[in-house]
Amino acid sequence: MNKKGLFITFEGVEGAGKTTLIKKLVAFFTEKQRDVFLTREPGGSELGKKLRSIILNADEKICPSAELFLFLADRSQHVEECIKPALKAGKIVLCDRFIDSTIAYQGYGRGMDIAQLTNFNTVATGGLEPHLTFLLDLLPERGLKRAKERNIEQNLTIDEGRFEAEALQFHQKIREGFLALAEQKKRFFIVNAEQDAEQVFCIAKQYLEENFLL
Ligand code: T5A
């Protein structure tokens, strides 16, 4: 019998540990013989890979509204081409960033109108919302430090991508945005991402086992 799809998203400031947690959850679900679909924004679909490269690595300066529409184009294609079919097939979809990143980064970070962004998100997703969103909460300075250390380790530019180079205040607004969203939406579960990666994983796993009867 086909199991029901489950849509889980992961949000947080730069370097909060989303990728690290997702990798551990993939192993956990695989052990339980659940079919997992791992994806991310931007860049989940084939078109999205091209858009990701433009968004994060463009030489040209991208104005805030153009940046927004690139993220939304990425999301529209991603939902239609990847997420909806995976959910229909009963898979567990683990998505690194989704609609809440637009509200936090373009809304709280860039100062764009939140109500308008919410409507744009609905257009891009056709109203699809995650069943669960893990917010990895961390002081932005800690996350940026981790991201920088990782970039050095992996021989990337220290401030890889267009957001890691933004001022600390920008990242503080983004954290506030995520925390405000988590207060408004029941689907959020906040994990203190100061803890080591294994502890973060254990907390997320326990929440899943207790609330989603895996
Ligand atoms: N964006 C995205 C928008 O502005 N609007 C949108 O609508 C969307 C969808 C995407 C950028 O686009 C923006 C947000 C982003 O700036 P990205 O390259 O995908 O860019 O970057 P991020 O999603 O921010 O991902 P990062 O790779 O920077 O961070 P992660 O995945 O949260 O962190 P991770 O797991 O790679 O960990 C970073 C380092 O810390 C270590 C890891 O080993 C790694 O070295 N680490 C820990 N160290 C100590 N304790 C822990 N608990 C740790 N967990 C991980």
Image (spheres, helix red, strand yellow):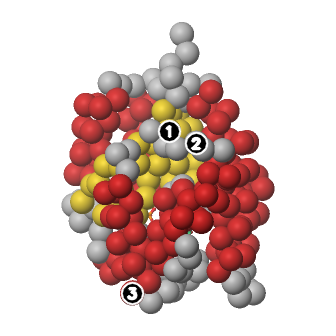
Marker disc for residue 128: 2
Residue under the image location 67 percent in, 53 percent down: 124
Q: Can the viewer see residue 82 in this picture? A: yes
Residue 37, percent from left and from top: 56, 38
Q: Nearer the viewer, mark 2 or mark 3?
A: 2
Taking the image as shown, residue 156 lies to the left or right of residue 170, namely: right
Q: CA distance from mark 2 to mark 3?
A: 31 Å
Q: Nearer the viewer, mark 2 or mark 1?
A: 2
Residue under the image location 58 percent in, 48 percent down: 39
Q: Which residue is mark 3?
A: 169
Secondary element type, mark 2: loop
What's the residue type where badge 2 is placed? Answer: Leu
Q: Are marks 2 and 1 in contact (CB under 8 Å)?
A: yes
Q: Are marks 2 and 3 in contact (CB under 8 Å)?
A: no
Residue 184, percent from left and from top: 35, 55
Q: CA distance from mark 3 to mark 1?
A: 31 Å
Taking the image as shown, residue 130 lies to the left or right of residue 84, namely: left
Q: Which residue is mark 1?
A: 7
